[in-house]
């Protein structure tokens, strides 16, 4: 090959290299990569928005259609309890256990004796919440605190929409017994012990809080029946006073000997 031919070949090679170097293909490839990256980012943003909308829609449906009881933790689980409520309701931090107390079915199936007038108050979320007991360890005795009022009057008060207190049973001045709340449910009478007690309120004729003999006899009779049903004993009777220090039932707080005599009377009845 002559020098001229070699020079021509070198020139052609140089021209080809310059042409490849100046080709728009790499630039187009870079622009295409940038375009694909932008599209991927846009798709991710759209998917994130759609996911958020679906989650919000699901939450709205859950709040609308789920039972109110499913969200008790929103009502009761937030905040810190700084003092014990004195209106008879639970401490809000207490939640039902995952494994329910095994004796609950006995209370569900119980049939009231014919000397109990069953007048259940409506479920209103406060006086009667429709929440089942978590356990049963005691029977709590109270007095109504309204001298001269009847069991029926107090029952009707419990049933009012704005009332936030109740008991399982009311005993009247003549010894009549009214059931207000099913015995498998919590009442709103004994504060933190609503979770594991059956509550009994007793009417009284005057400010001393002393019960009539008819009321007293019915109280012993009812406690006897409840103890036989549940396996509790006379030692499992408590006063509202023993839970919160509230002077209730007043006569049994003011006269400790009368309270001890009452428990002995229940024990004697159970022994028969």
Image: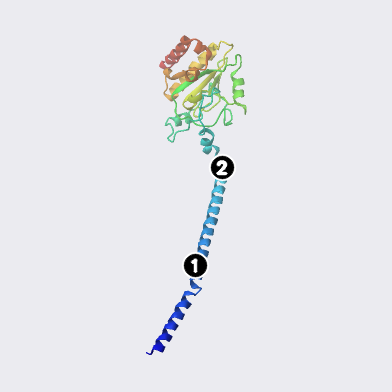
Q: Position of residue 150 (x, y in %)?
A: 60, 17
Closer to viewer: mark 2 or mark 1? 1
Name the outermost residue toward the bottom: 2
Q: Residues within 10 Å of mark 1 (few under 14, many from 20)?
A: few
Quarter that holds the N terminus: bottom left
The residue nearer to you, when weighing 118 against 168, is 168
Q: Position of residue 199 (x, y in %)?
A: 51, 22
Q: Could you tell me which residue is drawn at 52 percent across and 38 percent down?
A: 70
Q: Is residue 43 left or right of residue 3?
A: right
SS at circle 1 = helix
Q: Could you tell me which residue is drawn at 55 percent across and 53 percent down?
A: 49
Q: Quadrant of residue 50?
A: bottom right
Q: Are marks 2 and 1 in contact (CB under 8 Å)?
A: no
Q: CA distance from mark 2 to mark 1?
A: 50 Å
The residue nearer to you, when weighing 133 against 175, is 133
Q: Quadrant of residue 149?
A: top right
Q: Which mark is residue 30?
A: 1
- Sequence-earlier tag: 2 or 1: 1
Q: Position of residue 63 (x, y in %)?
A: 56, 42
Q: Residues within 10 Å of mark 2 (few under 14, many from 20)?
A: few
Residue, disc 2:
63
Q: Which mark is residue 190?
A: none
The residue nearer to you, when weighing 7 against 63, is 7
Q: Could you tell me which residue is drawn at 52 percent across and 13 percent down?
A: 216
């Amino acid at each position: 090959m002559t020098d001229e031919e070699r020079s021509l070949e070198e020139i052609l090679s140089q021209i080809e290299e310059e042409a490849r170097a100046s080709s728009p293909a790499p630039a187009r490839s870079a622009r295409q990569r940038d375009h694909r990256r932008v599209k991927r980012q846009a798709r991710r943003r759209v998917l994130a928005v759609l996911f958020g909308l679906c989650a919000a829609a699901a939450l709205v449906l859950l709040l609308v259609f789920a039972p109110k009881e499913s969200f008790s933790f929103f009502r009761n689980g937030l905040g810190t309890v700084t003092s014990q409520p004195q209106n008879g309701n639970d401490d809000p931090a207490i939640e039902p256990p995952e494994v329910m107390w095994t004796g609950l079915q006995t209370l569900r199936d119980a049939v009231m004796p014919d000397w109990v007038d069953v007048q259940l108050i409506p479920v209103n979320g406060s006086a009667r919440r429709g929440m089942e007991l978590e356990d049963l360890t005691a029977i709590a005795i109270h007095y109504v605190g309204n001298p001269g009022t009847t069991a029926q009057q107090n029952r009707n008060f419990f049933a009012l929409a704005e009332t936030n207190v109740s008991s399982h049973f009311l005993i009247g001045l003549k010894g009549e017994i009214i059931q207000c709340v099913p015995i498998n449910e919590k009442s709103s009478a004994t504060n933190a012990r609503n979770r594991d007690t059956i509550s009994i309120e007793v009417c009284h004729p005057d400010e001393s809080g002393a019960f009539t003999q008819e009321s007293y006899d019915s109280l012993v009779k009812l406690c006897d029946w409840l103890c036989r049903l549940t396996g509790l004993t006379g030692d499992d009777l408590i006063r509202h006073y023993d839970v919160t220090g509230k002077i209730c039932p007043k006569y049994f707080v003011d006269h400790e000997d009368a309270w001890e005599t009452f428990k002995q009377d229940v024990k004697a009845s159970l022994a028969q």
